[in-house]
Image: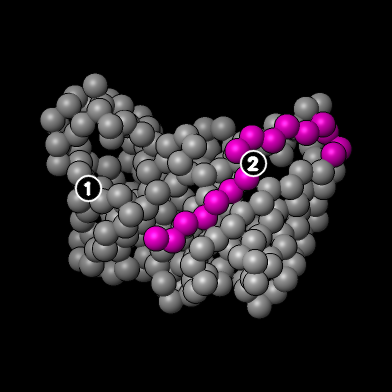
């Protein structure tokens, strides 16, 4: 069974702080994704990566960056956290078929920026 | 841009009744349509999916239908049970692409 692990379940940060959200998957999946989940808006794609050191912007990349130095690890970085980034963040992975295959999600990190 | 519209946003049914959730997608290239269930405080998990070469797929009490011409797909849950209460997301993607576009979600309440 695929396991996607997000390092923190809950985080509280102050405005202006640099925030790192970490995600590790154990199934050797090529593709990894960061989504943001807000009520009434569904899941929106922030960034994705299809290979080590490769990254692509999703639909809402502003204010975020990512890092993928190893195949199993994908990090989301909030360069300067703002209150409108308070949200649930979900990491996911998938095999090479990408949009044609199921996503395996982590448990999520609920980030509060005060 | 690509989007997926999902209705209704909230659905309340009596235990034993059926529930139907409908989605519409905009990208003609979409050929993969998964449905995810997210229980309170948990991760979204795939419950059923359908590819564009199939019109209907069933798995016990859950079925999904796809109308490619109209760009509609629907989730049908029969004989609902309280443990079916959750948020359900439809999504659309395509083989060879990377993006999966999600609907806004439907919160299903099954009253015992």
Residue drawn 56% across the image and 68% down it: B32
Question: Label 1: few (<14), some or many (≥20) within 10 Å?
Answer: few
* Element class at badge 1: loop
Q: Which residue is mark 1?
A: A62
User: Which label belongs to residue B8?
Assistant: 2
Question: Label 2: few (<14), some or many (≥20) within 10 Å?
Answer: some
Q: CA distance from mark 2 to mark 1?
A: 30 Å
Residue A70 versus residue B24: which sits nearer the camera?
Answer: B24
Q: Is residue A36 at all visible to an observer of this figure?
A: yes
Chain under disc 2:
B
**Quarter-wise, where is residue A29 in the image?**
bottom left
Q: Position of residue A12 (x, y in %)?
A: 27, 25
* Element class at badge 2: loop
Chain under disc 1:
A
Stretch of the chain drawn in magenta:
B1-17
- Report the quarter where the N terminus of chain B lies: bottom left
Q: Is residue A73 at all visible to an observer of this figure?
A: no
Check the image and tell me how it is coloured: one colour
């Amino acid at each position: 069974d695929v396991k996607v692990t997000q390092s923190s379940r809950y985080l509280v940060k102050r405005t202006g702080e640099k925030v790192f959200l970490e995600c590790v998957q154990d199934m050797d999946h090529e593709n990894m994704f960061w989504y943001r989940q807000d009520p009434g808006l569904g899941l929106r794609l922030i960034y994705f990566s299809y290979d080590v050191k490769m990254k692509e912007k999703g639909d809402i990349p502003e204010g975020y960056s990512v890092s993928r130095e190893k195949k199993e690890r994908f990090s989301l970085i909030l360069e300067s956290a703002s209150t409108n980034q308070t949200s649930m963040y979900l990491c996911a992975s998938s095999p090479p078929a990408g949009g044609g295959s199921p996503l395996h999600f982590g448990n999520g990190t609920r980030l509060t920026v005060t | 841009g690509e989007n997926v519209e999902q209705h209704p946003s909230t659905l309340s049914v009596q235990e034993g009744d059926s529930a139907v959730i409908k989605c519409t997608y905009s990208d003609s290239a979409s050929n993969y349509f998964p449905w995810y269930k997210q229980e309170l405080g948990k991760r979204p998990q795939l419950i059923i999916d359908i590819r564009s070469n199939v019109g209907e797929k069933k798995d016990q009490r859950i079925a999904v239908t796809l109308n490619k011409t109209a760009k509609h797909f629907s989730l049908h849950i029969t004989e609902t049970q309280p443990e079916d209460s959750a948020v359900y997301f439809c999504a659309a993607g395509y083989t060879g692409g990377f993006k999966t576009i999600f609907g806004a979600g439907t919160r299903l309440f099954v009253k015992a």
